[in-house]
Image (cartoon, rainbow, N blue to C red):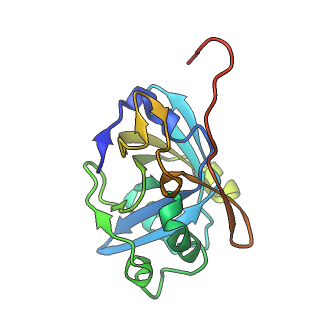
Amino acid sequence: MREPVELSKAYLLMNHGPVTLVSSAAGGKRNVMAASWAMPLDFAPPKIAVVIDKSTFSRELIEASGEFVLNIPCRAIAEQVLAVGSCCGRGEDKFSQTGLSTVPASIVDAPLVGGCVAWLECKVIPEARNEQHYDLFLAEVVAAWADPRVFSGGRWHFPSEDLRTLHYLAGGNFIATGDAFSVGAETE
């Protein structure tokens, strides 16, 4: 289940620093990898930054296609998140290996990962120096989606533990996003 998110509000999907799954596709091949180093950069047009190591199969596909999807997983699929972050997709299809489903994206060719709670379709903004020296990719968000059970009205709300987003600590350990609270006047 997903609904569109206004592009000017797409940064809110990433602002709390969750783990992401980066899905990519090119030349009839596809892959998915876990990435904790991803963040929003700008509002209009919305931009993100993500680190994609040069040794990964995902990097090859992203360089070939110029696009990817940042998928925001939840606790319900934490086991698959760890699995796709722990193996290489060059020899086998990680989606088949882990049982992760896919849904076609609306603008890019990379698939949306099933079981996630938000999705950002992205087109790479070429920055060769950043990509080569720092493995840092900048991209414009061209479409954004969220599961309305957990994101609506520009805010996250978690009705159940299994729908909370994830933060990776290390060694197979995660924490789930906690309870939200407000202090003072609301600002954006």
- Residue 68 quadrant: bottom left
On the image, the x and y values in percent for residue 40 come to: 56, 38
View extreme (right): residue: 170
Residue shown at the point (61%, 73%) measured from the top left: 55
Pick the residue in front: 178 or 51: 178
On the image, the x and y values in percent for residue 56 come to: 57, 73
Residue shown at the point (39%, 72%) measured from the top left: 100
**Is residue 109 left or right of 149 when viewed as pictured?**
left
**Is residue 94 left or right of 27 when viewed as pictured?**
right
Residue shown at the point (31%, 72%) measured from the top left: 27
Determine whether 106 is above or below 23 in the image: above
On-image quarter of the C terminus: top right
Can you see residue 45?
A: no
On the image, the x and y values in percent for residue 42 come to: 54, 30
Can you see residue 98?
A: yes
On the image, the x and y values in percent for residue 102 come to: 31, 66
Pick the residue in front: 116 or 94: 116
Determine whether 135 is above or below 54 in the image: above
Residue shown at the point (62%, 48%) measured from the top left: 177
Pick the residue in front: 57 or 182: 182
What number of labels is visible? 0
